[in-house]
Image (cartoon, helix red, strand yellow):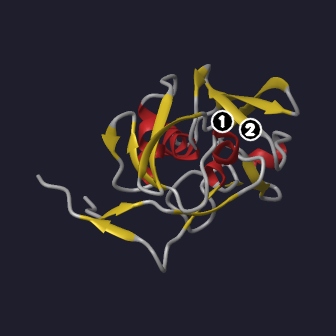
Amino acid sequence: IRIAPAEVPIIAKLQPGSPAAKSGLRPNDSIIELNGKPLYNILNIDDFLRDHPNEPITLTVLRKGARIPIPFDPGYPAIGAVVKDSPAARAGLRAGDAIVAIDGQPIKSATAVSNFIKKRGEHPFAITIDRDGKRFDVSLTPERPQGDTLPRIGVEWEQDYGIMLDAYGRMKISHPTP
């Protein structure tokens, strides 16, 4: 078990055209709630998406003292790079591809994809890809790289949601009550 301090995420920058930018989030917004519940760490968004891939999300931000609810569509996890000679490369995956589903189940976070692969081991599965608006399925079989204990498919993920946090100067530590 890992216990991390509660950190109210403060947005430093947004990647242009990203899900975060399209939703209306802005630099200097503090993300304080996810669907009406306190957000203590940016990773809580991934946790929610892993467990509730079909539920809509509303992020509440604190902007210049005002609480503003913002509907948020995270999109699908996008591949940033494909490792040469990896299972993903052999299956024809490319940087920019978005993973829409695994074995027919919708998926909304890179963490959920990684967790699926860890649990699945070195057994094949179907993955639905969106490439430039066209969807297709490929079969992948994860492999354990030499010296590694976990199976992998050989991808690096894009920056999640296009949010770059202010991890230094203005991080706000919050102390929730038990």
Q: Residue at x 63, y 60 (%)?
A: 145
Dot 1 falls on a residue whose secondary structure is loop
Amino acid at dot 2: Ala
Q: Are marks 1 and 2 in contact (CB under 8 Å)?
A: yes
53 with respect to 173 (left or right): right
Q: Is residue 143 visible?
A: no
Say whether disc 1 or disc 2 marks the residue closer to the N-terminus: 1
Residue 167, above or below 127: below
The three-letter code of the residue at mark 1 reads Gly
Q: Which residue is mark 2?
A: 98
The residue that disc 1 covers is: 75
User: Is 19 situated above or below 170?
Assistant: above
Residue 4 coordinates in the image, percent (x, y): 30, 65
* Residue 67 sits in quarter: top left
Query: Extreme front residue here?
Result: 65
Q: Residue at x 41, y 32 (%)?
A: 51
Residue 90: horizontal and vertical position, in percent?
83, 45
Indicate which label's residue lies in the foreground, 1 or 2: 1
